[in-house]
Amino acid sequence: MPKVYILNGPNLNLLGQRQPEIYGSTTLADIEARCRELGRELGVEIGFFQSNHEGQIIDTIHEARHQAQAIIINPAAFTHTSVAILDALNAFDGPVLEVHISNVHKREGFRHHSYVSLRADGVIAGFGTHGYALALRHAASMIL
């Protein structure tokens, strides 16, 4: 069965607790459960990861090169700072979809630039946590 890695960056472990006016009340565990359920419906296996550490995210992207056919990534704050994550994604051969819960373009100016977008095959922003399902449906359509 094809596998999709869903990677989450710093502070996303605090979803449902941190700034609910921006990110809502859904937790990362809720998102994972929904993605796993949708993955079963779509016929794709899910690898779901979160880290507050850039190196762990890079290591997981490297692992995905041999384990996954697509990556969905919400790089969170690393979106705007990490050339290293961009370089790791550039070494991955399958589709990469970038997800942001909030509409980063309506927020602070520094959030308008994404290094990850230079590699992403598509970007979903501002659809709340529903963006993960949109990305997963699209990733599945690209690899099945």
Image (spheres, rainbow, N blue to C red):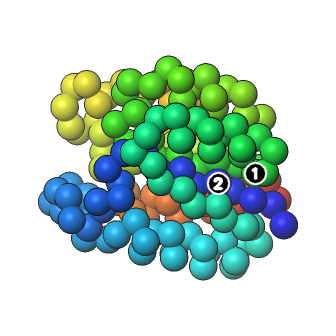
Q: Residue 68 carries which label?
A: 1
From the viewer's side, name the closer residue of 142 and 22: 22
Please determine whether, in this image, residue 58 is positioned above or below residue 60.
above
Q: Identify the residue at horizontal 30%, vertical 62% (top origin).
A: 15
Q: Which amino acid does label 2 sit on?
A: Tyr
**Marks 2/1: CA distance?**
6 Å
Q: In which quarter of the image is the N terminus?
A: bottom right
* Residue 70 image position (x, y, % from top left): 71, 48
State which tag comes first along the sequence, 2 or 1.
2
Could you tell me which secondary element the residue under label 1 belongs to? loop
**Above or below for 44 versus 84:** below
Q: Is residue 128 visible?
A: yes
Foreground residue among 118 and 65: 65
Amino acid type, residue under disc 1 in the picture: Ala
Query: The C terminus is located in which quarter?
Result: bottom right
Relative to 59, 24 lies left or right: left
Which residue is at 40% across, 33% downward?
78
Q: In this view, does 129 lie to the left or right of 40?
A: left
Q: Do the residues labelled 2 and 1 touch (CB within 8 Å)?
A: yes
Residue behind mark 2 = 5
Query: Is the residue marked by circle 1 packed among few (<14), some (14-19), or many (20+) residues within 10 Å?
Result: many
